[in-house]
């Protein structure tokens, strides 16, 4: 990172103890001027910039940040980011426990309903403030470290971008992809049908030819083949569905059932790759209203990504969190993680870091989650792992309640 050149101010600060009171007054004035210059620069930014401490308390907000979140001057140091963005903290806490590491860089799209209905993309980046060497600390080292640990929160308003997604989808690239996919899907339909028929015939023949105990063993494999053929068909349909923006066919579903279904299909591959899976099966969860095939597609895409991120094996954990207005499902892997610079790009169509990747998986997930009024968040740390959180609303969201004046000012 480039460092600022040592200014005359730094030199004066270096010998602060030898200054007399009038020099100190001049120094204080200069510092105030420097500070207001920096503040003015920060206030010019369209992005919101907040600084938070490890507990989430907001220590600073530039004008855009205050405007987007409805933060007032007197809230500084009093309100936490978690209060302004409900649900955010839960998944961070989860991740801290899970990956036993510091908070990694976080990228997430969140809706803020006050003072305006907007969608913001939020990045949280940790940084360490320089320690004040001049004062002796009486705190234990962990507390000391905590005291200097800060997080920069960068907020970009993506409301317009989100609105224009539908239009972007009509773009030429997507259109040509759609035609191609539609053609391929059509072509694949026939061999898939033929496979289904022949698998059925084979099943009958096996039942006739072999004693039941032996037949069952082979039929187990056959059933997996049939399941896979069906899934292939489903993948094609869902792929087209996601591109075409088919509206979801909402039914009452239990998320654990879907997890079970998807893990059955991927089970063998997970074992082969030495990936240990832990699912919070016992969790009492309310039903969600969702499209079975689309959500299965979401899980499939995400588990595939997690698997591909762990070429040398690892640990995959699926857990859940309940909120007032919905459920979050968290998929944590101990894979390679996502580079900080890539975090903002993973939802873009065609963005991939894999030789064999198509870069459409997360775009489809994103679109399906949006069509379900849900959202997806990613927290990742290179070399450590990734946690994907999916939020499913269980009923329509009520507006966030805020105290006092509806007329915020910084
Ligand atoms: P693809 O899997 O075809 O590359 P995706 O849209 O599914 O396309 O993912 C885009 C990119 O996001 C991947 O190439 C990878 O770099 C990154 N990514 C997604 N999920 C994970 C994960 N669990 N761990 C590490 N990187 C991931
Ligand atoms: Mg993928």
Image: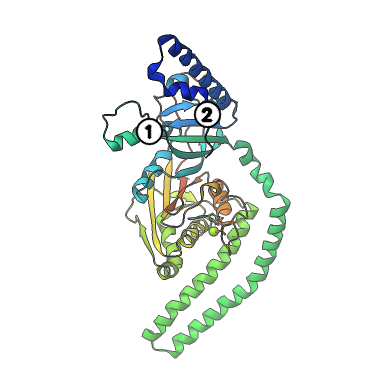
Instruction: For mark 2, give the secondary structure.
Output: helix
Displayed quadrant of residue 191: bottom right
Displayed quadrant of residue 324: top left
Q: Where residue 122 sits in the image (x, y, percent)?
A: 51, 38
Q: Nearer the viewer, mark 2 or mark 1?
A: 1
Instruction: For mark 1, give the secondary structure.
Output: helix
Q: Where residue 329 sits in the image (x, y, percent)?
A: 42, 50
The first of marks 2 and 1 along the sequence is: 2
* Disc 2 residue: CB within 8 Å of ligand 1: no
**Which residue is at a point 60% across and 77% down the rendered structure image?**
194
**Which residue is at a point 56% across and 61% down the rendered structure image?**
354
Q: Observer-nearest residue: 260 or 382?
A: 382
Q: Does residue 393 appear to the left or right of 364 in the view shown?
A: left
Q: Where residue 128 sits in the image (x, y, percent)?
A: 42, 36
Q: Where residue 22 sits in the image (x, y, percent)?
A: 44, 9
Q: Does residue 403 appear to the left or right of 358 in the view shown?
A: left
Judging by the rendered image, the residue that carries numbered circle 1 is 148
In this view, the residue farthest toward the bottom is 209
10 Å neighbourhood of mark 1: few (<14), some, or many (≥20)? some
Q: CA distance from mark 2 to mark 1?
A: 22 Å
């Amino acid at each position: 990172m480039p460092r600022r050149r040592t200014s005359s101010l730094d030199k004066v600060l270096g010998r602060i103890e030898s200054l007399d009171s009038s020099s100190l007054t001049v120094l204080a004035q200069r510092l105030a001027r420097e500070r207001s210059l920096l503040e003015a620069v920060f206030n010019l930014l369209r992005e919101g910039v907040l600084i938070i401490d490890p507990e989430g308390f907001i220590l600073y907000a530039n004008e855009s940040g205050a405007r987007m979140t409805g933060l007032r001057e007197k809230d500084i140091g009093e309100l936490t980011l978690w209060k302004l963005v409900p649900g955010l903290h839960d998944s961070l806490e989860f991740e801290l426990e899970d990956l036993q590491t510091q908070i990694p860089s976080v990228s997430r799209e969140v809706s803020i309903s006050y003072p305006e209905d907007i969608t913001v993309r939020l990045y949280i980046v940790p940084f360490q403030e320089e320690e004040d060497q001049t004062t002796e600390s009486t705190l234990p080292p962990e507390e000391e470290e905590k005291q200097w640990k800060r997080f920069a929160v960068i907020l970009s308003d993506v409301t317009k971008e989100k609105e224009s997604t539908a239009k972007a989808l009509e773009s030429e690239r997507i259109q040509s992809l759609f035609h191609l996919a539609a053609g391929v899907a059509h072509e694949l339909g026939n061999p898939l049908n033929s496979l289904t028929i022949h698998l059925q015939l084979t099943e009958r023949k096996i039942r006739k030819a072999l004693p039941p105990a032996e037949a069952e063993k082979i039929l187990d494999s056959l059933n997996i083949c049939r399941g896979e053929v069906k899934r292939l068909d489903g993948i094609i349909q869902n792929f087209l569905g996601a591109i075409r923006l088919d509206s979801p066919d909402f039914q009452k579903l239990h998320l654990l059932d879907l997890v079970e279904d998807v893990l059955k299909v991927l089970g063998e591959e997970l074992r082969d790759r030495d990936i240990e899976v832990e699912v919070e099966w016992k969790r009492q969860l309310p039903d969600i209203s969702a499209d079975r095939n689309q959500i299965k597609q979401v899980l499939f895409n995400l588990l595939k990504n997690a698997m591909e991120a762990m070429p040398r094996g690892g640990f995959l954990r699926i857990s859940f969190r309940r909120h007032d207005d919905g459920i979050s499902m968290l998929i944590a892997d101990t894979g390679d993680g996502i580079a900080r610079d890539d975090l903002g790009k993973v939802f873009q169509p065609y963005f991939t870091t894999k030789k064999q990747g198509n870069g459409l998986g997360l775009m489809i997930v994103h679109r399906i989650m949006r069509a379900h009024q849900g959202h997806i968040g990613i927290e990742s740390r290179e070399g450590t792992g990734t946690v994907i959180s999916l939020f499913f609303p269980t009923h329509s969201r009520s507006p966030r309640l805020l105290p006092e004046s509806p007329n915020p000012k910084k």
